Amino acid sequence: MKQITTVLFLSLLFSCGSSKTVRQSEKTIKGQWVLNTINYNQPGTYNVSLLNDASKECFEQSTWQFIPNNNTGIYTINTPNCNTGERNFNFTIQEIDETTGLYNFLLKPTDAKGNSETNQGFRLKLAQLSDTNMRWEQTLTVDGKPFTINMNFSKL
């Protein structure tokens, strides 16, 4: 009877956990990354503030650390003439469709203790993730048309 109870408990525990795709993504994202380039799907000059924090120019070459075991991280803006320094965040990888492997990345800026002042987060599409590269896409509406911001990372 004790063995049956243990098996049922473990089955319940694992069935409530993340999917295989999400677990693999968390394993892959773990570590240090650099945000190399940011580009848009439409030509032109845009004044975009990413994550309600800084401009494209400030975010390019920023460094990012992901710690998936507690879903936290830190990004550091290093660009001169920008508000440099470390910023904390919480993140979640959320699977949309297991058959296609599509998933979202939810990022929420926090303070060093993990508390959010505004409780505002950002939903990004985790469009590409490998052991060496990652691409996020955020689609907004500009003048009634979709406008996509592509953020291209490489692993350090």
Image (cartoon, helix red, strand yellow):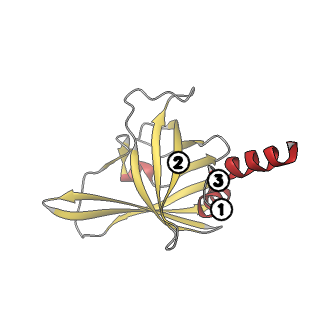
Q: Residues within 10 Å of mark 1 (few under 14, many from 20)?
A: few
Q: Mark 2 or 3 closer to N-term? A: 3
Q: Residues within 10 Å of mark 3 (few under 14, many from 20)?
A: few
Q: Is residue 86 above or below residue 8?
A: above
As shown in the figure, which amino acid type bears the numbered disc 1?
Gln
Counting from the top left corner in percent of width and height, residue 22 is at 59, 59
Which residue position holds label 3?
15
Q: Mark 2 or 1 closer to N-term? A: 1
Q: Which one is nearer the viewer's eye here, 20 or 137?
A: 20
Counting from the top left corner in percent of width and height, residue 144 is at 13, 61
Which residue position holds label 2?
92
As shown in the figure, which amino acid type bears the numbered disc 3?
Ser
As shown in the figure, which amino acid type bears the numbered disc 2?
Thr
Q: Residue furthest bottom?
A: 100
Residue under the point 36% across and 65% down: 39
Tell whether 81 sits left or right of 71.
Answer: left
- Asked whether residue 94 is in view, the answer is yes
Q: Secondary structure at mark 2?
A: strand
Q: Mark 3 or 1 closer to N-term? A: 3
Q: Which one is nearer the viewer's eye here, 108 or 52?
A: 108
What is the distance, in whole Å, between disc 2 and disc 1 at their CAs? Answer: 13 Å
Counting from the top left corner in percent of width and height, residue 141 is at 21, 58
Which residue position holds label 1?
24
In the image, which is nearer the foreground, mark 2 or mark 3? Answer: 3
Cβ atoms under marks 3 and 1 closer than 8 Å: no
